[in-house]
Image: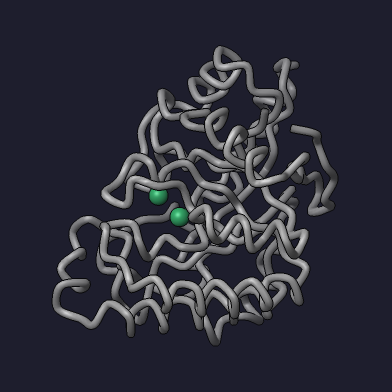
């Protein structure tokens, strides 16, 4: 199986050497992995309160290290992925930068609402201080803009706003899923099934089963990622996610090479 969402210590909140991630992937029987570390926000002119990405000057060596791991003849291909924050208003620079480097795929993710990093443990109080359904509306409106921007190949952890266990009510979620799946379908983008949700208060993969069922009805392609921030997390939950996908009806997942999509049977 594949794991398309691995971080590296360059992002300031992950640990371990890239080669250790590769060794762990081999041990767990993965057939392909992709690093998808956080794209340098300084290149996009954005400075978060807590640094969570590599620096612009580290991008070349990040890619070079992936190439050097591949050239050692590792048994499994290692893809050049990247996880990019979708910043509304910065679409032009984002497109230009993504085209300037030889990525295999780009995950578009949302971690910020304005200057609030709602995925950061140090900033979780924003949920208690705000109105949760409004936060959800704001977040998913941005997800739909991300999809419509057509900047990325994959949407990362599409319902990560649930990370710390602050949920909106069921009818609201049904409406959000309906609207969001339409936008995803129209854009042709792929979604990521991200197993990191099992490690946090949400205690559920991203996206939820209801979300996955709606995606399946619309034939929306999926990739798989653990969002590993240390070597032992590589592949974590991936085989459990495969069972879930089969149960929902999926028979294949998407893989990427040089930003072209192809498929692998589950
Ligand atoms: Zn991270
Ligand atoms: Zn992320």
Q: Position of residue 205 (x, y in %)?
A: 46, 47
Residue ID at (65%, 74%): 147
Marker count (numbered): 0
Indicate how the structure is coloured in the image. one colour
Residue ID at (39%, 71%): 170
Q: Position of residue 163 (x, y in %)?
A: 33, 57
Residue 215 in view here = yes
Quadrant position of residue 263:
top right
Using the image as rendered, state which of residue 14 and residue 55 is in the foreground.
14
Using the image as rendered, state which of residue 60 and residue 175 is in the foreground.
175
Name the quarter where the C terminus is drawn.
Answer: top right
In the visual, does 60 lie left or right of 6?
Answer: right
Q: Return the residue found at the far top.
A: 27
Whether 208 is drawn above or below 265: the answer is: below
In the visual, does 162 lie left or right of 28?
Answer: left
Using the image as rendered, state which of residue 107 and residue 178 is in the foreground.
178
Residue 65 in view here = no
Residue ID at (31%, 66%): 167
Name the quarter where the N terminus is drawn.
Answer: top right
Whether 1 is drawn above or below 134: the answer is: above
In the visual, does 224 lie left or right of 113?
Answer: right
Quadrant position of residue 233:
top left
Q: Position of residue 47 (x, y in %)?
A: 35, 71
Residue ID at (36%, 56%): 52
Q: Position of residue 21 (x, y in %)?
A: 51, 25
């Amino acid at each position: 199986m594949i794991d398309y969402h691995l971080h590296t210590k360059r992002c300031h909140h992950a640990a371990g050497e890239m080669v250790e991630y590769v060794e762990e992937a081999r041990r767990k029987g993965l057939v392909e992995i992709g690093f998808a570390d956080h794209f340098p926000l300084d290149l996009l002119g954005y400075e978060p309160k807590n640094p969570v990405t590599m620096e612009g000057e580290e991008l070349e060596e990040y890619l070079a290290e992936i190439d050097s791991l591949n050239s050692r003849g590792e048994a499994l291909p290692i893809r050049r992925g990247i996880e990019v924050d979708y910043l509304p208003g910065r679409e032009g620079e984002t497109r230009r930068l993504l085209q300037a480097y030889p990525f295999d795929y780009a995950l578009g993710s949302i971690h910020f609402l304005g200057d609030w990093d709602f995925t950061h443990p140090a900033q979780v109080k924003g949920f208690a201080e705000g109105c949760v359904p409004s936060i959800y509306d704001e977040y998913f409106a941005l997800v739909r803009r991300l999809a419509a921007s057509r900047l990325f190949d994959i949407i990362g952890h599409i319902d990560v706003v649930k990370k710390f266990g602050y949920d909106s009510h069921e009818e609201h979620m049904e409406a959000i899923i309906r609207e969001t799946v339409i936008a995803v379908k129209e854009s042709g983008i792929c979604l990521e099934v991200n197993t990191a949700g099992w490690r946090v208060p949400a205690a559920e993969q991203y996206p939820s089963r209801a979300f996955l069922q709606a995606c399946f009805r619309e034939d929306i392609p999926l990739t798989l990622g653990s969002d590993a921030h240390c070597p032992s997390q590589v592949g974590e939950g991936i085989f459990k996610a495969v069972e879930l996908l089969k149960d929902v009806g999926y028979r294949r997942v998407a893989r990427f090479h040089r930003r072209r999509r192809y498929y692998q049977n589950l």
